Amino acid sequence: KNQVEQSPQSLIILEGKNCTLQCNYTVSPFSNLRWYKQDTGRGPVSLTIMTFSENTKSNGRYTATLDADTKQSSLHITASQLSDSASYICVVRGLTNAGKSTFGDGTTLTVKP
Amino acid sequence: EPEVTQTPSHQVTQMGQEVILRCVPISNHLYFYWYRQILGQKVEFLVSFYNNEISEKSEIFDDQFSVERPDGSNFTLKIRSTKLEDSAMYFCASSEAPGAPYNEQFFGPGTRLTVL
């Protein structure tokens, strides 16, 4: 069964600090891996998308890495801001035409002043 | 910037009633999806739709659920006889092209369904 596991489940950091979120997956073969930010009560918003051939993708203060051999990805957030408080979800899309995606449980990040 | 829209934002219904959740995907997109998220749980795939038919569906998407693209802009999710456990946030998403390696899915703001 395709699975996506994220860690930690929750994280509290101080404003201005950096943090790294982890994602391990078993989906194989896969088309792409995405990191989403989801604010409470809102729809997920895409941060980065990587195919299996990409190792790193940045979007402002967000940098995602991918190791397709070990099936691991990470999302690094630098110089955190209060507005970064949200759930961060790792999503892996399998290599099918239908585009079915498997979602991780998410990491809840709280940035405190 | 184009976006996926959903209506209503919040739907309250009685158990056993039918509900229709509506979505307007981004206009040039070809793939449409429905997901749900029960409060405090992760987002779950329900169904994908392409070329006027279901491409893939999850085990959650049973006979009580149906999807339709009634015209060129709307994409609907119908739940025939709602159950208490159908209470969740329902997200619609759309993407541009099948097979594209990125195939980014854009999500709508969601409809919160409350079944009493």
Image (spheres, grey):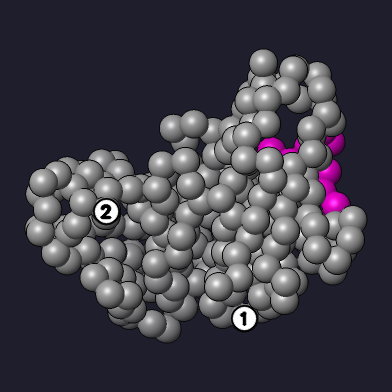
Q: Residue at x 55, y 73 (%)?
A: B1
Q: Position of residue B111 (x, y in %)?
A: 62, 41
Q: Please tell me whether mark 1 or mark 2 is closer to you in this view.
A: 2
Indicate the amino acid at tag 1.
Ala
In screen coordinates, is A56 left or right of B86? left
Identify the residue at horizontal 89%, vertical 61% (top origin): B71
Label 1 sits on a secondary structure element that is: loop
SS for callout 2: helix
Residue A83 on the magenta span: no
* Residue A55 in which image quadrant: bottom left
Can residue A67 be seen from the camera position used here? no
Query: Gap between marks 1 and 2, in whole Å?
Result: 32 Å
Q: Mark 2, chain letter?
A: A
| Residue that label 1 marks | B100
**Structural crowding at the residue carrying mark 2, measured as other residues with C-alpha within 10 Å and reported as few (<14), some (14–19) or many (≥20):** few
Q: Amino acid at mark 2?
A: Ser
Q: Which mark is residue A83?
A: 2
Q: Is residue B7 above or below residue A95?
A: above
Q: Quadrant of residue B95?
A: bottom right
Q: Write down the quadrant of residue B101 in the picture.
A: bottom right
Q: Chain of mark 1?
A: B
Residue B36 position in % (x across, y down): 60, 42
Seen at 68% across and 41% down, the residue is B8
**Image side of residue B34 versus residue B70, left or right:** left
